[in-house]
Amino acid sequence: MKNFSLCLIFLWTTLQQSSVQTAVPATVLNCCEGEILLLLDSSGSVANYEFSRLLVFTSELLRLFSLGRGHVRVGLLQVGTEPHLEFGLDVHSSQESLQRALRSVRQLQGDTNTEAALRVAQQLLEEEEEVPKILLWLTDGVQPGDVEWRMSKLKERGVFVLAVSTVHGNYHVLRRVVTPPLESHLYSVDIDNMDIITEDLRDAIIRIIRAERLRVVHLTSHSAVLRWRPVLSADGFYEFWYRSIWRTDPEIRRALSAASSQVELTDLQPDTTYSASLRPESNQGLFPTLSVDFTTLSNVLSPAVVSLSDLGPRQIRVSWGPLQRSRVQRYKVEYGVLPGGLVRSVTLPRQMNSTLLTDLEPDTQYLVTVSALHVDGSEAAMSVRVCTQQAAPPALVDLQLSPVERQVDEVQAAWRSHQEGLKGFWVSWETGDSHSSPSQTSFYLPASAWSTRLTRLSPSGRVCVSPLYSSGRGDGICCTARTPAG
């Protein structure tokens, strides 16, 4: 309890110091419109000090944004044995209110039931609000559960998944669930050095939810609909112009009313790149000119190209194009072992142009066929052959626990490694006796150490060894040591 109180004092002092920083220019504060749902690991695997540092980091990360509808909406969902919605997306419309709420957050403790929290997150982010949506996962990565399927469902609905993990995080899980690119959407950092990623992560968020942009919301081979966030009062107007960047067609200009928020372009040429610009005109002040380049769809029926990526022993990512949402009803991906193996299939909505095929056989040739059912009743299909990779040996094998002579609560742990590039090992085990609940003890070992002695091991204590890479912790192996009760 004393340590917990010290952590709260540290959190309060740090947030109070941050709140008196120099004010940010309004042009920065009003940069964005979107939703950010924070998924915060509040389980018992996160130390009180680490939890307070995550809250301080969150406070500084969000401090520059204007809040509320029409700006940035922020929600906080805590992960524990049961999920806890600390506050929803519509609760805070000012920084003062948000910062006060962050100072009052209390850790849940309990298990890391991330899967249950993601069910709540999916409901919160399904609101029909046409703004960019971000799920920011703050975690230590310890046993997050079966999260990949639910994360993929969020991404299918257009949610951007970003993640920040402490150095204990399971990098292999995180890299599969975040939205590419990994270099700006996935961060693995020591808890005491989180401030070094604040600016980079904030810039990545701004790139997703920046409001001052001209967006293409609908595209065909002969038309396009462009949309923007209205910024003018009744006395202004928008000057809009566009032209093909490859053809000699003249530039076309239009004047649009101040109430306008979108424009439809027709009679465009297929498979052609256009450049469009929008300038708000008003005596209230100067507004930046917004621009966007887009390429109309080809007359070729989708799928015209099929590509493969993320090849592994048991998975293949299949992608296809062009993406023709206005023409296609749905896609079907069929795959089976050659020759003559059982054919499996998955049906996907028209807005998707890739899927990850899993549970495949290693070192096996597959035939993959992507077909599209078009709105006019026609069908088009394309097939490719691909071989899965050979199964790689696990990074760690053969964890052995040997009793130490005359020491009933000690064991010698030894293991073997089959991978290069390891930075070390993370060893953890349960300590205690039969009269108390076991507690977790852990430490780091260099890559050259393949054995260690563990002391104060609880009866039937669990021992785990995990490989450490420069980017985080990988999947490890565990074993239960049977020791006599004290």
Image (tube, helix red, strand yellow):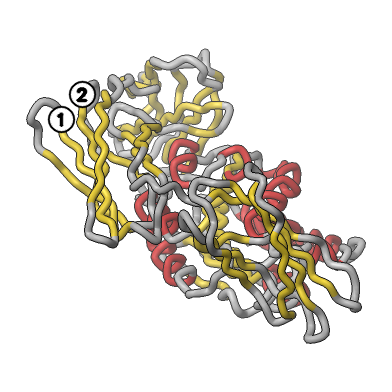
Cα separation between marks 2 and 1: 7 Å
Mark 2 or mark 1: whose residue is earlier in sequence? 1
Farthest-out residue, bottom = 234
Q: Secondary structure at mark 2?
A: loop
Tell me the residue that label 1 is attached to.
337
The numbered dot on residue 59 is none
Q: Is residue 403 visible?
A: no
Marks 2,1: beta carbons within 8 A: yes
Residue name at image x 66 percent, y 61 percent: 214
Q: Amino acid at mark 2?
A: Thr
Q: Is residue 140 above or below residue 478?
A: below
Tell me: 83 left or right of 289: left
Residue name at image x 64 percent, y 49 percent: 244
156 and 483: which is toward the camera: 156
The numbered dot on residue 364 is 2
Q: Looking at the rendering, which quadrant does residue 33 occupy? A: bottom right
